[in-house]
Image: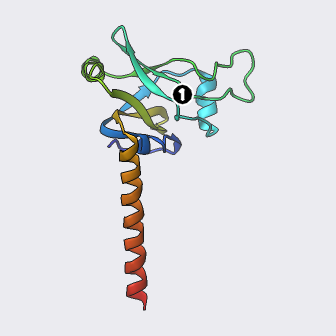
Amino acid sequence: MTKQTGPVVATNRKARHEYHLDASLEAGLALTGTEVKALRAGAASLVDGWVSFDGGQAYLEGVHIPEYVQGTWTNHTPRRKRKLLLHKDQIRKWAAKTKEPGVTVIPLRLYFSGGRAKVEIALARGKRDWDKRQALRQRQDALEARRAIRTRTFR
């Protein structure tokens, strides 16, 4: 996991339900001025986001950062391709891992650290439907066990 110091702007809550997460990494984002202002206002959606590798670079795609309300003609397009700031070795290693079938890279959290926008990305393998049902069942069983223990200790 990465250390986070600033406020979380957006989280991808669906990611842990839809994917098995293998490894995570913190990456910087190359943003325009209105994108940073919109993020500081607390508006973003990571649900449809993914990371693509092209020409030795990593790009964050499908992430929705709405237009800044007070922005003028300098406003950005909400779903543009944004460059991730990573070391070449990290890009090369993660790009090679995404060549395996069923492996992708998705964003988990978007936050500020030291005044700079950061995104936590993770290697992910898609879950099957029975995996999702099994995870929900385990979560429900754990919740029921905690409730039973709580009621036992207070009586």
Q: Residue furthest bottom?
A: 155
Against 32, is 66 above or below? below
Q: Position of residue 135 (x, y in %)?
A: 37, 52
Image quadrant in which you'd find residue 9: top right
Q: Identify the residue at horizontal 40%, vertical 47% (top origin).
A: 132
Q: What element carries label 1?
A: loop
Residue, disc 1: 63
Residue 56 is left or right of residue 119, and the answer is left
In the picture shown, does residue 114 fall above or below 52? Answer: below
Q: In this view, does 95 lie to the left or right of 9?
A: left
Residue displayed at 28% across by 17% down: 88
Q: Is residue 4 visible?
A: no
Asked whether residue 2 is in view, the answer is yes
Residue at x 34%, y 41% (from the top left corner): 2
- Residue 24 locus on image (x, y percent): 32, 36
Q: Position of residue 80 (x, y in %)?
A: 57, 18
The residue most toward the top is 55
Q: Residue furthest front?
A: 130
Q: Quadrant of the N terminus?
A: top left
Judging depth in this view, the residue of 133 and 80 nearest the camera is 133
Q: Percent x, y for residue 25?
A: 33, 34
Q: What residue type is labelled 1?
A: Val
Asked which quadrant contains residue 128, the reply is top left
